[in-house]
Structures are given as structure tokens and as C-alpha cells.
């Protein structure tokens, strides 16, 4: 039995023991909320959670989780004292208590056998390793994107989630946003005709291998710089990094194709019914990369030429029409006969509420999430392969089964990055 199952069993036993002893005890009043009445969830049935990484996006996700009555947050972990203390204040105010514990070391919160699931919203450099460690500790995982920095990390994560039997939801929340879901339905239903091209809104691919200038390193209790770096190469401390200005630096970031492509390439994969594969050919063209699937469908990853439907737009084209949509909730469809499918949605593409709700349902049911580790790994592999082609500046063939570039040693070396000691899977 896993730690998760043990914790649930222990809470069910305690609930039964309390109920049995009440038969013989002096009558007293038990609040209805403690019994799960009046819309409340009894403590024995709640999903007990902790968080690792509570910066901007992590704090936002935490706020959504705290709205859910079936969730009880008990611990916050962050390498920065101000962030973990701020998050603790948010949790304690929600529950009108001082019970939320803070940690600078994720291994301490993961050792708690009363914690069922983790929110992981660190910087990208930690997503793979923290998720694998959490899965090994018996925790279910909601992890922000991008879930990996390389092809090899993507596969290691998916394999670990399967090995340890955990529920995993990547933070690619647009899989549960209605305008994107409708666009997918139009592509898969044949209403666009035979699908021939899918377009993913990506950002400029480039990253830099330079570093920010060194600054005096804070004391460990304020910022644990060594732990912040984690498996990435040792670099001198600079306060801008810990303020979130690490994007664009190769050591910590996978580039602009991955940044938005972890969402939009993911949606294109879904539209093409290709969640279990990737394109087989990648060709860089300026800041764009054009790829081709084995079924002949073309994937265009580009940062310009969009219709203004909002950030993270996608466009699906068939021989009888097209649909384009983005984070605004607006849609463009053509030709005229498709206008009857038009909707304007009020969902916001950055809002993970529905996505988090699905994750919590699956934690209880042990079901498979929309953005499970296998699905997310495939779209990330596609993004990483595109970035490799862009960095090398030449077309590349790709084997989706072996996840390698056939006969290309230079490209294959770029499928992984070395992790700094002592970090390893």
C-alpha cells in the first residue's frame, strides 16, 4: 500500500473510531461541517496537499486550489523565505488557523505521510526532477509547464509517473478551456474537411548562454541559492534570477518554442489525434519551424501572422475550412458554412480552474487526466526536437518511437543535458 493509500486508510479508521466512541460518550454537539454536511467536505475525505514553488504562477494556482472545498493545504516549500511566508499567510487566512507549515527543503514536506498530492510550480529547471521525487514519495502531482528542459527529461518523467502509479496533470490548462476544446472538436469531427495543417503560436526561439553578473549571495535561510539552482550548472547568484528573470537563459530555460509551444503544440497534437507520437521531420525557417507528421499533416510553429485572437493562439486547417482561436476566447472560422459553429467564450486561457478541478476528480477516482504525463511528454518532445533543429539551423528527421534523430550524432547529443551533482534520477 502506498503512503497515499495509507494516509487515506488511517483517516477513514480515525473517522470510524470517533463515530463508534460517540455512541458511549456524553452527548455533545458536532459541527455539521465536520460531518460533511451543508456542502462541506469532511476532513477524512479531503485531499491533503502541499506546494513546492510559490512564486507568481504558483501563488495563482494555490489560490485556485484553496477555493476547492475538498482540498486541505498543510505545507508550503520554497527556496525563498519571503515567498513561503507569504503563501503560508494566504493558507492560514483561508483556514483561520496557524497550522500551515513552511519548508525550505522539499524532502521534508515530501516525507509527510499525511500529504496526498503536490502542487509543483518551481522554475522550469526543477519540474522534471521535483515531479519524479514526488512520485517516488507516493504523491499525486499537479505540475506547471514546461514539464521538462529536454527530450530525455520528458521521457524520464513519463516513465516515472507510470512506474509509481501516480495521477499527474501538467499545467497545460487549455486542454480544459472551452474555445480550444471546440476548435479541437471541429478538427477531429471532419467539419473542417480533411485536416492538412495545424499552426502553433510560439515565441522567438533564442536563448543566451551568458550569465547575469555576480552579486553577493544571501544567507541560506533567506534564499537557498544552491537549492534554487538544483540540477542546473553552477552559476553566480544574481537577484534578478530569483525574481523570475531567468527566462531566456539557456541553463534555466528551453526557449520560446517550448515556452508557449508546451501549450499550443500540445493542442495541435490533440487536433491531429497525435497524442501518442510526434512529427517525423523538422525544418527551421527563420524564427519558425515547420514539421511534418507521418500521416502527412503539417505542423507550423510560428510567432507572427496571427489574427489577433489572443496569446497562445492555434489554427487548424482542413480542405473545407479553418478555425483559429486564442486566449481571448474569440474564434475565427471560414468559410461561411462554418459560421454556425461560432461561439465567443468567457473562459480565459490562463485560468486553470477547470483543469485543477479535473485533477482533483482524478485524484479521487484514480482516473487519467487530460494532460497526463504521457500526453504532455509527447508534445514537449516535439517542442524540444523543433528547438534542436532551430539551433542547428538545418532540417532534421526524427524517430518518434526511439525519440532520436536517425544517424545524426550532433543532434542526438542535444536530446539531454547533464545534471549537476548530486542530482540524478
Image: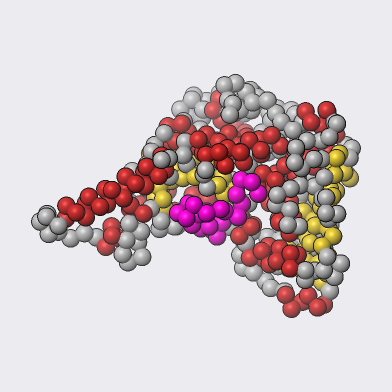
Image quadrant in which you'd find residue 339: bottom right
Above or below for 220 versus 100:
above
State which quadrant residue 413 falls in: top right
Question: At 66% from the left edge and 39% from the top edge, which residue is drawn?
Answer: 154
Q: Position of residue 115 (x, y in %)?
A: 41, 42
Q: Left or right: 306 with respect to 419?
A: right
Give the residue drawn at x 82%, y 45%. 280
As rendered, which of 150 and 189 lies closer to the eye?
Answer: 189
Residue at 68% in and 25% down? 418
Q: Is residue 367 magenta?
A: yes
Q: Main secondary structure of the magenta part?
A: helix
Q: Nearer the viewer, residue 324 or 190?
A: 190
What is the quadrant of the N terminus in the image?
A: top left
The residue at 26%/48% (across/down) is 14
Seen in the picture, residue 57 relative to 249 is either above or below; the reply is below
**Image quadrant containing the C terminus:** top right
Look at the image and give the residue range highlighted in magenta.
Answer: 354-375
Q: Is residue 189 left or right of residue 64?
A: right
Q: Position of residue 196 (x, y in %)?
A: 84, 60
Image coordinates of residue 380 in percent, x first then y, are 70, 44
Q: Residue furthest top?
A: 421
Amino acid at each position: 500500500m502506498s503512503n497515499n493509500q495509507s494516509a487515506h486508510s488511517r483517516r477513514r479508521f480515525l473517522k470510524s473510531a470517533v463515530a463508534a466512541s460517540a455512541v458511549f460518550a456524553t452527548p455533545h454537539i458536532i459541527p455539521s461541517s465536520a460531518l460533511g454536511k451543508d456542502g462541506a467536505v469532511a476532513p477524512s475525505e479531503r485531499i491533503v496537499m502541499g506546494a513546492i514553488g510559490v512564486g507568481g504562477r504558483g501563488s495563482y494556482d494555490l489560490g485556485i486550489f484553496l477555493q476547492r472545498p475538498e482540498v486541505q493545504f498543510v505545507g508550503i516549500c520554497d527556496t525563498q523565505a519571503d515567498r513561503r511566508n507569504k503563501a503560508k499567510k494566504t493558507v492560514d487566512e483561508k483556514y483561520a488557523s496557524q497550522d500551515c507549515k513552511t519548508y525550505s527543503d522539499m524532502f521534508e514536506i515530501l516525507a509527510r505521510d499525511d500529504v496526498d498530492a503536490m502542487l509543483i510550480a518551481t522554475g522550469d529547471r526543477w519540474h522534471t526532477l521535483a515531479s519524479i521525487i514526488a512520485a517516488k514519495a507516493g504523491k499525486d502531482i499537479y505540475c506547471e509547464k514546461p514539464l521538462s528542459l529536454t527530450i530525455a527529461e520528458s521521457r524520464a518523467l513519463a516513465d516515472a509517473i507510470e512506474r509509481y502509479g501516480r495521477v499527474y496533470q501538467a499545467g497545460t490548462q487549455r486542454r480544459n478551456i472551452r474555445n480550444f476544446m471546440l476548435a479541437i472538436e471541429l478538427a477531429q469531427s471532419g467539419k473542417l474537411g480533411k485536416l492538412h495543417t495545424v499552426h502553433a503560436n510560439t515565441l522567438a526561439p533564442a536563448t543566451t548562454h551568458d550569465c547575469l553578473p555576480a552579486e553577493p549571495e544571501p544567507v541560506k535561510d533567506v534564499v537557498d541559492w544552491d537549492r534554487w539552482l538544483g540540477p542546473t550548472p553552477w552559476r553566480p547568484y544574481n537577484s534578478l534570477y530569483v525574481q523570475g528573470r531567468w527566462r531566456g537563459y539557456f541553463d534555466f530555460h528551453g526557449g520560446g518554442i517550448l515556452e508557449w509551444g508546451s501549450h499550443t503544440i500540445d493542442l495541435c497534437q490533440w487536433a491531429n489525434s497525435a497524442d501518442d507520437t510526434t512529427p517525423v521531420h523538422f525544418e527551421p525557417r527563420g524564427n519558425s519551424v515547420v514539421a511534418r507528421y507521418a500521416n502527412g499533416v503539417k505542423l507550423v510553429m510560428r510567432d507572427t501572422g496571427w489574427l489577433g485572437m489572443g496569446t497562445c493562439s492555434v489554427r487548424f486547417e482542413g480542405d473545407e475550412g479553418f478555425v483559429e482561436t486564442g486566449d481571448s476566447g474569440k474564434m475565427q472560422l471560414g468559410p461561411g458554412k462554418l459560421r454556425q459553429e461560432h461561439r465567443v467564450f468567457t473562459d480565459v486561457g490562463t485560468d486553470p480552474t477547470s483543469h485543477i478541478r479535473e485533477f482533483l476528480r482524478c485524484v479521487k477516482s484514480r482516473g487519467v487526466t487530460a494532460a497526463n504525463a504521457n500526453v504532455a511528454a509527447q508534445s514537449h518532445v516535439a517542442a524540444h526536437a523543433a528547438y534542436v533543429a532551430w539551433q542547428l539551423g538545418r532540417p532534421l528527421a526524427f524517430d518518434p518511437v526511439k525519440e532520436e534523430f536517425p544517424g545524426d550524432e550532433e543532434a542526438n547529443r542535444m536530446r539531454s543535458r547533464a545534471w549537476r551533482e548530486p542530482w540524478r534520477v
